Image: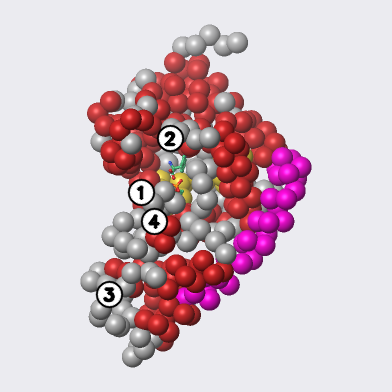
C-alpha cells in the first residue's frame, strides 16, 4: 500500500540545461504517480560557491517555476526550498560527526571544483556531500534519481546511513540511486568528452531550457561532430552519439530508428531536424514557465505548502536522531 519514497534536489545556480532536463528532471515527472516524491531546490548547496543574494533569490524562484513547467505537479509531489526546512542542516551536523575526512577527500566533484577556484576553498564545499546525505536520509528515501555525476555522493549517503544504523540502532533507510541507462550524461556540444554544464565558459557548449529558438538552432548548428559523415552511434563519434541521445530523448524514438532514418544522409539533415525537435520540445515548457513565473503569489503558496509537508516528516526523523545521539528533548 505504502508508496516508495523518492527524493531529489537541484541547485538554483543559474539556468538549467537540457543536460539537467534529460539526465534528471524529465524523469522526476514520470516518477510522480508510482512514488511519493520529494523535490527540493537546494539553495543551501548553492552557496558553497559565491552567489549574489539577488541572483540567488531570482534563480530559486526560476528553478521552482521551471520544475513545475517540466511537469512536476505540486499536488502529487512535495516541492520545496531547502532552507525552509532547517532540519536539513541540523541533521547534516550530526552526520558530519560520523563522516571521515578521507571519504570527503575522495569526492571527485570537490576535487574538480577546488581546482577551478583555489581562492574559494571553503569548508562547506568540502562537507557539501554530508548535507546532501541529510537531505536524502531525512525522508526515509528509497530511491534517488540523479545523473551519473552524483553517484559518488549517493554512495556516501548510503554509507552514512549504514554507519549511523550500526552505531545507534536502525534509524535510516539506505537509499538506492536511480540512474537512467542512457541520457544519464549529456555532453558539451563543443567538447563531447566533457559534461554539458551551465558553468561552461563557452555558451555554445550547452542549451538552456529557456534559450530562444534562434539560439537553440545556432548552438545545434555549431555542435562539434567529426569528419566521418555518417550518423552512427558509437564511441568513435562522440559528438554524433551525444546528439543522438538528445534527439532520442526529445523525440521518444529509439536510437536505432533514428540511425536508420539518416542512413546515407549527411549531418546537415540530421542537425536541421534535431533543431526543430529541440525547439518544439522546449517551447511548451517555456510557455508554462512564463505564465508561472509572472504569478509570484501562486509560487509562494506552493513553496509554503511544500515546506510544511516536508517539515512534518523531517521533524519526526530529526527528533528520533537527536534522541539516539543523547540530546535532551526540548
Ligand atoms: P546540477 O546542475 O549539478 O545541480 O545537477 C542537477 C541534476 O542534473 C543532477 O541530478 C545531475 O546529475 C543532472 N545533470 C547535470 N548535468 C547533466 C548532464 N550534462 N547530463 C545528465 N545529467 C546532468
Ligand atoms: N548535489 C546535487 C547536484 O549538484 C544536488 C542535490 C542536493 C541532490 N541534495 C540532493 C540530489 C539530494 C539528489 C538528492 O546535482
Q: Give 120 or 248, whichever is nearer the viewer.
A: 120
Q: Residue furthest top?
A: 328
Q: Where residue 6 sits in the image (x, y, percent)?
A: 52, 46
Looking at the image, tell me whether mark 2 or mark 4 is earlier in sequence order.
2
For disc 4, the marked residue is 202
Q: Secondary structure at mark 1?
A: helix
Q: Is residue 276 above or below residue 84?
A: below
Measure the C-alpha gap from mark 2 to mark 4: 19 Å
Which circle marks residue 226 in the picture? 3
Q: In screen coordinates, is 53 left or right of 107? A: right
Mark 4 residue CB less than 8 A from any atom of ligand 1: no
Answer with the quarter of the image where residue 304 lies: top right
Gap between marks 3 and 2, in whole Å? 36 Å
The Cα atoms of the two marked residues, 1 and 4, are separated by 20 Å
Q: Which residue is mark 2?
A: 49
Numbered disc 4: secondary structure:
loop
Which stretch appears magenta? 274-302
* Label 2, label 1: how far apart the Cα atoms are: 18 Å
Q: Is residue 279 magenta?
A: yes
Would you name the residue on which mark 1 appears?
Answer: 149
Instruction: Indicate the quadrant where residue 285 lies.
Output: bottom right
Q: CA distance from mark 3 to mark 1?
A: 26 Å
Amino acid at each position: 500500500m505504502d508508496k516508495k519514497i523518492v527524493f531529489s534536489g537541484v541547485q538554483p545556480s543559474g539556468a538549467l540545461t537540457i543536460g539537467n532536463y534529460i539526465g534528471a528532471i524529465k524523469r522526476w515527472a514520470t516518477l510522480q504517480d508510482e512514488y511519493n516524491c520529494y523535490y527540493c531546490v537546494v539553495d543551501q548547496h548553492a552557496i558553497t560557491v559565491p552567489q549574489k543574494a539577488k541572483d540567488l533569490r531570482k534563480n530559486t524562484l526560476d528553478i521552482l517555476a521551471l520544475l513545475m513547467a517540466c511537469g512536476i505537479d505540486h499536488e502529487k509531489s512535495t516541492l520545496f526550498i531547502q532552507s525552509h526546512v532547517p532540519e536539513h542542516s541540523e541533521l547534516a551536523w550530526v552526520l558530519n560527526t560520523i563522516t571521515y575526512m578521507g571519504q570527503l577527500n575522495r569526492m571527485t566533484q570537490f576535487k574538480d571544483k577546488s581546482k577551478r577556484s583555489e581562492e574559494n576553498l571553503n569548508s562547506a564545499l568540502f562537507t557539501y556531500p554530508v548535507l546532501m546525505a541529510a537531505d536524502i536520509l531525512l525522508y526515509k528515501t528509497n530511491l534517488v534519481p540523479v545523473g551519473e555525476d552524483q553517484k559518488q555522493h549517493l554512495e556516501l549517503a548510503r554509507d552514512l546511513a549504514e554507519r549511523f544504523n550500526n552505531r545507534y540502532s536502525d534509524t535510516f533507510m539506505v537509499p538506492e540511486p536511480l540512474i537512467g541507462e542512457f541520457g544519464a550524461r549529456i555532453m558539451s556540444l563543443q567538447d563531447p568528452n566533457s559534461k554539458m554544464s551551465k558553468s561552461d565558459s563557452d555558451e555554445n557548449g550547452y542549451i538552456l531550457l529557456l534559450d530562444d529558438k534562434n539560439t537553440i538552432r545556432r548552438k545545434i548548428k555549431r555542435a562539434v561532430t567529426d569528419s566521418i559523415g555518417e550518423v552512427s552511434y558509437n564511441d568513435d563519434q562522440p559528438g554524433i552519439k551525444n546528439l543522438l541521445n538528445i534527439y532520442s530523448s526529445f523525440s521518444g524514438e529509439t536510437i536505432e530508428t533514428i540511425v536508420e532514418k539518416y542512413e546515407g544522409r549527411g549531418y546537415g539533415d540530421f542537425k536541421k531536424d534535431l533543431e526543430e525537435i529541440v525547439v518544439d520540445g522546449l517551447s511548451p515548457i517555456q510557455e508554462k514557465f512564463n505564465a508561472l513565473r509572472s504569478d509570484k503569489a501562486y509560487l509562494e503558496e506552493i513553496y509554503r505548502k511544500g515546506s510544511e509537508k516536508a517539515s512534518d516528516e523531517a521533524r519526526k526523523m530529526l527528533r528520533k536522531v537527536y534522541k539516539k545521539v543523547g540530546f535532551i528533548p526540548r
